[in-house]
Image (cartoon, rainbow, N blue to C red):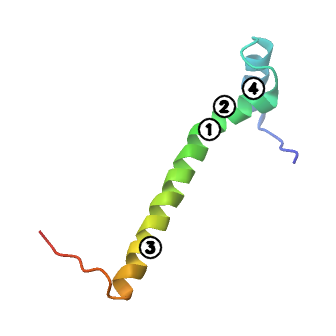
Amino acid sequence: MAVKLPPDIAELVTARVESGDFASPEEVLRAAMAPWIAREQARAATLDELRAERALDRRGQRHCIAP
């Protein structure tokens, strides 16, 4: 996959590689995306749990009792 970054982001990525903080642009982007990926995985897990609970409710196997 080839991605064209906006000039300002490309400059930031290049600066981080040139500073020695990262070995490659790919490494910079992987690190930058890690928090987003973690949030997406947590979101997907939450949705899966909610869907499973909803399926149980529909089958009458689970009843919610309001406090």
Measure the alpha-carbon separation of dots 1 and 3.
27 Å
Residue furthest toward the bottom? 59
For discs 4 and 1, the disc positioned in front in the rendered view: 1
Q: Is residue 19 above or below residue 57?
A: above
Q: Which residue is mark 1?
A: 34
Q: Is residue 23 left or right of residue 34?
A: right
Quadrant of the rendered image containing residue 33: top right
Kind of residue at disc 4: Val
Disc on the earlier residue, 1 or 3: 1
Measure the alpha-carbon separation of dots 2 and 1.
5 Å
Measure the alpha-carbon separation of dots 4 and 2.
11 Å
Quadrant of the rendered image containing residue 24: top right
For the residues bearing labels 4 and 1, Cβ distance under 8 angstroms: no
Q: Is residue 27 left or right of residue 58?
A: right
Q: Which residue is mark 3?
A: 52
Expressed as whole percent of the image width and height from the top left, the position of residue 19 reads 75, 11
Q: Residue at x 80, y 14 (%)?
A: 18
Residue furthest toward the left? 67
Q: Which residue is mark 4?
A: 13
Secondary structure under the numbered disc 2 in the rendered image: helix
Expressed as whole percent of the image width and height from the top left, the position of residue 7 reads 78, 32
Measure the alpha-carbon separation of dots 3 and 4.
41 Å
Q: Residues within 10 Å of mark 1 (few under 14, many from 20)?
A: few
Disc on the earlier residue, 2 or 3: 2
Circle on res. 31: 2
Q: Is residue 24 above or below residue 35?
A: above
Kind of residue at disc 3: Ala
Q: Is residue 62 visible?
A: yes
Expressed as whole percent of the image width and height from the top left, the position of residue 37 reads 60, 46
Q: Which quadrant, please, contains the C terminus?
A: bottom left
